Image: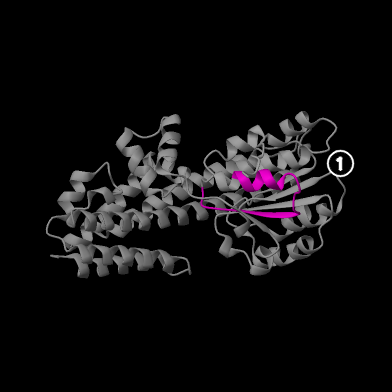
Amino acid sequence: MTPPTLEVPKALAEATEHQPAARAALAAALSEPSHAYLFAGPPGSGKRAAARAFAAELLAAGAPDAEDTRRRALADPSPHPDLVWVAPHGTQHLVEEVRRQVITAAAYRPFEGERRVFAIEAADAMADESQNALLKTLEEPASYAHLVLITSQPAALRETVRSRLQVVPFAPLADEAVEARLAEQGLAADQEERRAAARLAAGDPVRAAFLCGAEGRELRAAAEGFAAAARSGRLAEAPWLRLLTAAETAGSRAGEAAKARFAGLGLEGGEETAPAARRREREATEAARRSARRARTEALDLGLALIAAWLRDLSASAEHAEHLLLNVDRVEQVHGAAEGLDARRARRGAELAMETRRRLQVNVSEELALEALAFRLEALLRDA
């Protein structure tokens, strides 16, 4: 006998449109919710929207006015007093904020209904101290408290934390879904660029959107120029500097945006005191610095992924496997660059680029690592 299909609330259904496994898990969870969840999946897979929709349903259950509760909980930012949403201002959550907004607040009973929900966005950005502090709340939760941790890097969470969470898996979006989203946003010059951005972004619509903008196009050009300079022996041009500059530009833009957002969070009503204004300015500056560093690191990581993708495409072209190409908007350029190239060497070059990505995660010198990669690629690809 086929089990009955669970009814999925509208907002939750929309948020999980491309995530059938997550939709089924959350629909089942609403009937008997656990105290803590881990929404895990790649960037852009819809975790954040699904977490907010799920939180809205948890709060609506038993609320005096369910529809009004949903409306307020779904707002971003939410004015609902029983929904606490914690996001890092930069690269890391501050342990003081986790203690104050989650650990301490979880001990207080709901202001309105029967439940409180605490969502921690980018949970992987919690340092060990923050994660250790959260353990007791996870081990001995109040009956009315529900925690939702959202992460793109579940391995960055301590095993003691992960083991106390019910995992809700989110898969990368299909290329077609990413392409459709780019089209809806009016991004990319044409369909071929949208298709290439979707493939190169590996299911991440945010990264795909970046690739369709001026900064993303410059990063792609820098990555392709890096590989071309290595193969032709033009390393005197220092092609890694263009890659670093493109990443720096992306970081600066993100830092400016973060400072503007943070500066807009002033006190509502009345005037700020001079000390409060100075403190907010310092916090805005620090938030901008952290956001800039994070965006710069992400852009550099993407740049190396683009180098690897370009070299893989050269390998595929050399083996006449056009169906494997990622840079589908630059097929002729790929074929031209692949002429006379040993496919095995191109694949090895892609592996070297990925190895450099991993090295940059352990705080090696970025410029030295990129320069070393360029010379290794030159030795591998020149005249190959």
Residue 236 appearing in the image: no
Question: Which residue does the image show at 17% across and 55% down from the upper left?
Answer: 338
Q: Nearer the viewer, residue 276 or 290?
A: 290
Would you place residue 81 above or below residue 341 in this image? above
Label 1 amino acid?
Phe
Would you place residue 147 above or below residue 267 in this image? below
Residue occupied by mark 1: 111
Query: Which secondary structure lies at badge 1?
Result: loop
Give the percent coordinates (x, y) of residue 5: 64, 39
Give the percent coordinates (x, y) of residue 254: 51, 46
Residue 377 is covered by the magenta coloring: no
Q: Residue 71: which quarter of the image?
A: top right
Question: Which residue does the image show at 37% across and 54% down from the upper left?
Answer: 303
Q: Residue 300: which quarter of the image?
A: bottom left
Q: Quadrant of the C terminus?
A: bottom left
Q: How is the image coloured?
A: one colour
Q: Quadrant of the N terminus?
A: top right
Give the percent coordinates (x, y) of residue 50: 62, 42
Question: Which residue does the image show at 76% across and 48% down from the upper left?
Answer: 32
Question: Which residue does the image show at 43% across and 52% down from the upper left?
Answer: 299
Q: Is residue 272 left or right of residue 364?
A: right
The magenta-colored residue range is 23-43
Residue 337 appearing in the image: yes
Residue 39 is covered by the magenta coloring: yes
Q: Residue 17: which quarter of the image?
A: top right
Q: Is residue 117 left or right of residue 355?
A: right
Q: Nearer the viewer, residue 183 or 3?
A: 3
Would you place residue 80 above or below residue 354 in this image? above
Give the percent coordinates (x, y) of residue 250: 44, 47
